[in-house]
Every structure is written in structure tokens, then in C-alpha cells.
Image (spheres, rainbow, N blue to C red):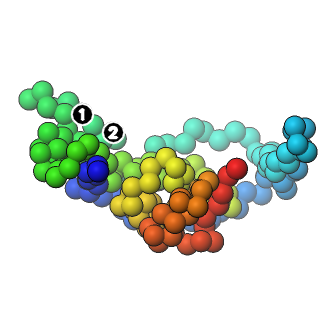
Amino acid sequence: MASANLLSRSLLPTPNPTQTSHPNRRSPTVVSFPRRHGRLSVRASVSTASPSPPPQPAATAAGVPKHCFRRGADGYLYCEGVRVEDAMAAAELSPFYLYSKPQILRNFAAYRDALQGLRSIVGYAVKANNNLPVLRVLRELGCGAVLVSGNELRLALQAGFDPARCGSCS
């Protein structure tokens, strides 16, 4: 049994995705690659627009650090201003996992911002972390679920993901 704690001391503003169109984007092209058992087809879109400046980091609320972990002047490790040793002491079970909700929000915002204007869904691979509180936060942000097994589908549905926003990779 493991203990997982989702640290949600400070939060980013709720994401508000907007759609914009890209007039300089060509229609998707299908490219086929030979495979051992048939052909692999890939759809790709190529932009004809001039390169844009590098994306700026996702906006953060005042006082929220860019990265969740830092070493304090007292020598202790802190996550979002909470001493990790104190969070570990509050956990009832071992091993102990500590997740930063503000960091999850920052990471989601970076992906959302990078894909802005494209017809896309930010998908989270349930295989990467199947912790239900983490999955629920991602679902609330509007993520889809990327699944490779029936158990991952069960977890995604249990976390409340919309089946229409779930996809599989094989």
C-alpha cells in the first residue's frame, strides 16, 4: 500500500482554452511507411507561416514558484512552500508519493498554450501515473486520457473522464 498526497496549497487560475484558426496551415497530408505487417499511415499538417517566436512559459500566479521543489535556507527540502519532511510525517502509509497540484497545473497550461489554435486534445497517459486524485485534477482541466489497457480504461472512467475524450495507442 502506498500513500499519495496531492499538494494543492496554491492554485493557478482556471484554464480557459480558446480556439484560433491558422490561415497559413495546409490541409493534412497522409504519409505511409512500410511496416513488417502492412503499412503505417500518419497524418501530418505543415505550416507555411514564418516561424513564430519561442513560446513564453505558462503564466503563474504571483508568488508561485516556477518549479515545485527547492532547498530552504534551513537545509530542508520544500515543495510549494511546504516542508517535505512535514508532509511525509503526516502521511499514514509508506511508501510516500508527493504530487504538486500547482506544478500539474503549470505543466498542463504549458501543453495547452503550445497547442493553442490547433484542433487538439491534451491527453494524459494513464500508464504514466494512475493515481486517482491526479487523474481527477487532469480531467477537471479538460485533459483526455490515453489508454493501452482495460485497467487503464477502468481507471479513466472511475476518475470521470469522458469516454469521447479517451484514446488508445497500440
Q: Which quarter of the picture shows residue 71?
A: top left
Label 1: few (<14), some (14–19) or many (≥20) C-alpha neighbours in 10 Å: some
Q: Which mark is residue 84?
A: none
Q: Is residue 144 visible?
A: no
Q: Position of residue 93 (x, y in %)?
A: 20, 50
Dividing the picture into quarters, in which one does residue 167 lie?
A: bottom right
Q: Hey, what amino acid is under mark 2?
A: His
Find numbered disc 1 in the image and state the secondary structure of the residue it sits on: strand
User: Mark 2 to mark 1: distance in Å?
Assistant: 8 Å
Marks 2/1 in contact by CB < 8 Å: the verdict is: yes
Q: Residue at x 59, y 71 (%)?
A: 163
Q: Secondary structure at mark 2?
A: loop
* Residue matched to label 1: 70
Q: Which residue is mark 2?
A: 67
Occupied quadrant, residue 27: bottom right
Residue 148 visible here: yes
Residue at (44%, 54%) from the top-left corner? 130
Q: Residue at x 8, y 29 (%)?
A: 74
Q: Residue 33, percent across and down? A: 88, 39
Q: Position of residue 144 (x, y in %)?
A: 56, 62
Residue furthest front in the image: 1
Left or right, 75 with respect to 157, comes to left
Q: Which amino acid lies under the numbered mark 1 shown in the image of this protein? A: Arg
